[in-house]
Image (spheres, rainbow, N blue to C red):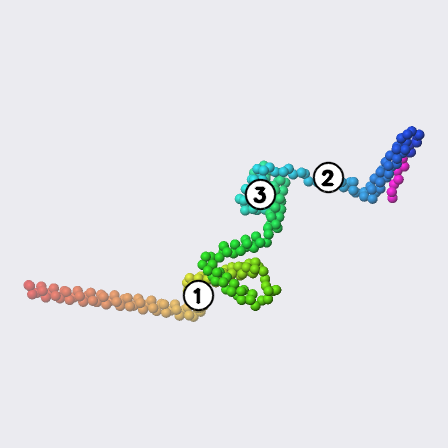
């Protein structure tokens, strides 16, 4: 409900300016009445205004030219890192003798400029840059193949243009860019195939063949283990007997040689005596 403020009416006098005083008095009453009505309709408006003023951000001072140059040097050294961590920002603020809000605003402005510059670049420059990058990837031997491919493409386009009506012909600029892109793609594909073939030729046959799996060891039963043990014992005994027999033969040979020499000595002794 609208409240009506009733003020004490001044005593009207017959002075020359009494009409002006009455008009100004009525105007004041109307203004106060409108204020009261606005308070009743929006009770939280006035109470919220001071809170908004308290939450308003403090004004960030602009940076100097030296700080801007140092910031650009930092960006070049750190690879244009547009989203650094809080520690990096604080460290940069210490080196530039600036506040943390100033550093955050510097990075925000740098990101805006970068995005604006990226959106402003024309499409022709982007195409030329991509074509240059593709040409730089291609090696020198593959340029001859690219020229051959260009000649084939131009021959095919010239024959096809003869058969096509003049209404359906494409612009020369678009056809040239398409031909160059097709030639570059073809040259890159040829180079990739050549590299794969060279790698396969240079590889050793042992690398090409798969590794052979080792045969798994067969489990030996107890019976087989016992048989192997007995066979080993028999073989060891046989070898011992053979060694003893060889020793006996050697002894016999030595004894025979000694006996033979003694007999000869006896014969010589009797003959001389």
| 3 is within the stretch colored magenta | yes
User: Of the residues under marks 2 and 3, which one precedes in the sequence?
Assistant: 2
**Image x and y of residue 43, in percent:** 81, 42
Furthest residue toward top: 15
As displayed, is residue 211 above or below residue 76?
A: below
Q: Which residues are magenta?
A: 1-7
Residue at image point 49% right, 54% down = 136
Q: Which residue is mark 1?
A: 209
Res. 214 image quadrant: bottom left
As displayed, is residue 270 above or below residue 87?
A: below
User: Of the residues under marks 2 and 1, which one precedes in the sequence?
Assistant: 2
Q: Report crowding for label 3: few under 14, some 14 to 19, many 20 or more residues within 10 A (C-alpha).
A: few
Instruction: Name the foreground residue: 214 vs 137.
Output: 137
- Quarter of the picture containing the N terminus is top right
Instruction: Name the foreground residue: 56 vs 246.
Output: 56
Q: Which residue is mark 3?
A: 88
Q: Report crowding for label 1: few under 14, some 14 to 19, many 20 or more residues within 10 A (C-alpha).
A: few
Residue at image point 46% right, 60% down = 144
**Dot 2: element:** helix
| Prevailing SS of the magenta stretch | loop
Q: Nearer the viewer, mark 2 or mark 1?
A: 2
**Image x and y of residue 239, in percent:** 31, 67
**Dot 3: element:** helix
**Image x and y of residue 248, in percent:** 24, 67
Q: Which residue is mark 2?
A: 53
User: Of the residues under marks 3 and 1, which one precedes in the sequence?
Assistant: 3
Is 245 on the left or on the right of 48, as rendered?
left
> Real-space Cα distance between discs 3 and 1?
53 Å
């Amino acid at each position: 409900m609208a409240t009506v403020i009733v003020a004490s009416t001044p005593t009207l006098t017959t002075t020359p300016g009494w009409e002006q005083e009455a008009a100004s008095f009525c105007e004041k009453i109307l203004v106060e009445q409108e204020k009261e009505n606005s308070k009743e309709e929006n009770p939280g408006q006035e109470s919220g205004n001071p809170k908004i003023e308290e939450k308003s951000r403090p004004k960030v001072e602009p940076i100097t030219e030296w700080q801007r140059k140092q910031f650009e040097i930092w960006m070049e050294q750190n690879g244009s890192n547009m989203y650094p961590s809080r520690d990096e920002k604080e460290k940069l603020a210490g080196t530039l003798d600036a506040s943390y809000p100033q550093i955050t605003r510097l990075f925000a402005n740098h990101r805006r400029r970068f995005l604006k510059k990226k959106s402003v670049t024309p499409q022709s420059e982007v195409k030329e840059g991509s074509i240059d990058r593709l040409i730089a990837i291609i090696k020198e031997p593959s340029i001859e193949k690219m020229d051959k491919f260009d000649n084939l493409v131009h021959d095919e386009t010239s024959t096809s243009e003869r058969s096509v009506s003049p209404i359906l012909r494409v612009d020369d600029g678009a056809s040239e860019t398409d031909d160059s892109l097709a030639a570059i793609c073809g040259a890159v594909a040829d180079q990739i195939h050549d590299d794969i073939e060279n790698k396969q030729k240079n590889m050793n046959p042992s690398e090409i063949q798969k590794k052979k799996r080792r045969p798994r060891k067969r489990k030996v039963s107890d019976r087989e283990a016992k048989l192997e043990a007995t066979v080993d014992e028999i073989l060891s005994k046989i070898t011992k007997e053979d060694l003893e027999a060889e020793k006996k033969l050697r002894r016999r040979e030595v004894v025979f040689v000694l006996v033979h020499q003694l007999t000869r000595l006896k014969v010589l002794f009797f003959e001389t005596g």
